[in-house]
Amino acid sequence: MESENNDLKRIFSGKDLAKLIFPLVIELMLTLLVGMIDSVMVSSAGEAAVSGVSLVDTVFQLLIYIFSAFGTGGAVVAGQYLGAGQKNNAKETAQQLVWFSAFSSIVIMILIYLIRGFLLGHVYGAITQEVHWNANRYLMIVGLSIPALSVYESGAAIFRTMGNSKITMMLSAIMNVVNICGNALLIYVFKMGTAGAATATVVARYTAAVIMILLLLRTNHPLYLQRTLKYIPDGNKIKRILQIGVPNGIENGLFQVGKIILAGLFTHFGTSAITANAVCLTISGIQVIPESAISLAATTVIARCVGAGDEKQVRFYNRLLLGISYVSMIVFCGVFWFGFPAILPLYHLSEQTAVLATKMILVHTLGAIGIWPLTFVLPSFMRAAGDVRFAMITSVASMFVFRLGAAYLFALTFGMGALGIWCAMLCDWGFRAIVFSLRWISGGWKNKSII
């Protein structure tokens, strides 16, 4: 009976957590599975097309991380306001988030087009002419979707803050169906190759962004947008959002920059290595879907607890969500590892590429089961509590020393080739897992509330 009463006092019941996490799992699964189907469809145009799209998508993953960081900043601030019972401040934070992200995305889009030549000619300088042509063709079209991507990410963060991840799941489904249908039509029927894949992506992202705005204008939600085109920046709210968003954006941005640099390193080992890496990035992303969903949910849960000033509940949800993360990791990683031989034929890979991809995914599977939750889920709790600078400094330092430094050491000096880059990833994860665990246990994340 006492346990029942304690459960009633919790900010999020088990049912609330399930309603928040399960739609996120489905949403992420849809996104990554469609990414895999995307790659399979593009592969009909040859390995050079797969490689070109993969290289550009690495850059776009950087943009997604940046917009997601802005969204996380808004979600943490709005979540803490909701936890403290300040609903008007929470609504104004949501308003500022969407407008600020939209204007920022236009600037970023222009910048991407300006540095396109440098990016493809220098960062990816070792690629073949055919891969370069496909990458350039894809980038020129898909770059138009940057503002839509920004608006969608901001809106998704707002709905998650309200504990309503069902909306983002449904929108993700719509966006991915549009994307797949567009790919099927433009790639298979009109034979447009990478241009077809890019066009389908642009249409899908704008479809989702428009629907997202229409939903956010509804006043029956706890957080909604005002029906006005007049934007008056609120320096105080924007500052609070950026207090979380900037360190998180720097961390995620530099992390993705590191991946772009490593993508350049993969080019030294040929198209086979680039393609194997592209395939494994998709599969490895699917392996950690539940934990990625829990990381997103943690922002909502922990921010609300911190806003309410309830440290006991922060620690309770920390233990609960980490436990769920490890159990789900074992299940998902195991399923996709044993199912990998059945997935590989879908990509029409050469024998050399298939063997390398199998080794890469084994490295990821072992590391993910052992340390992924401590490396990525645990710092989500810290960021939601406002402890973002420590997470940023640790992650950036680890990325440069281990992810990049060890990659060049293993791949070139030790002669491990492309597989050495994935082994270096585990060194990065291990270091961060240790440091984040010590930080959490010491209580260094306390008293970092943004509001």
Image (cartoon, rainbow, N blue to C red):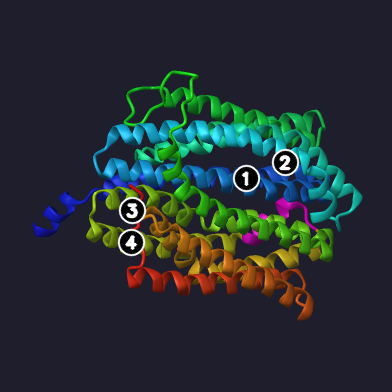
Disc 3 to disc 1, C-alpha distance? 27 Å
- Residue at 77 percent of width and 72 percent of height: 417
Q: Which residue is mark 1?
A: 63
Q: Nearer the viewer, mark 3 or mark 1?
A: 3
Q: Please report whichever mark, 3 or 1, sits nearer to the chain's N-terminal start.
A: 1
In terms of depth relative to the viewer, which is nearer, 303 or 200? 303
Q: Please report whichever mark, 2 or 1, sits nearer to the chain's N-terminal start.
A: 1
Do the residues bearing badges 2 and 3 touch, measured as CB atoms within 8 Å? no
Q: Which residue is mark 4?
A: 318
Q: Amino acid at mark 1?
A: Leu
Q: Is residue 294 left or right of residue 411?
A: left
Specify start and end residues of the magenta stretch as a single range: 340-349
Q: Secondary structure at mark 4?
A: helix
Disc 3 to disc 4, C-alpha distance? 17 Å
Q: Given the current orientation, which residue lies at the most extreme bottom position? A: 414
Whether residue 343 is in magenta: the answer is: yes
The numbered dot on residue 112 is: 2
Whether residue 95 is in magenta: the answer is: no
In terms of depth relative to the viewer, which is nearer, 90 or 206? 90
How many residues crowd around disc 1 within 10 Å: few (fewer than 14), some, or many (20 or more)? many
Q: Given the current orientation, which residue lies at the most extreme top position? A: 228
- Residue 176 seen: no
Q: Please report whichever mark, 4 or 1, sits nearer to the chain's N-terminal start.
A: 1
Q: Amino acid at mark 2?
A: Ile
How many residues crowd around disc 2 within 10 Å: few (fewer than 14), some, or many (20 or more)? many
Q: Nearer the viewer, mark 2 or mark 4?
A: 2
Q: Which residue is mark 3?
A: 449
Disc 4 to disc 1, C-alpha distance? 29 Å
Disc 2 to disc 4, C-alpha distance? 38 Å
Q: Nearer the viewer, mark 2 or mark 3?
A: 3
Disc 2 to disc 1, C-alpha distance? 10 Å
Q: Nearer the viewer, mark 3 or mark 4?
A: 3
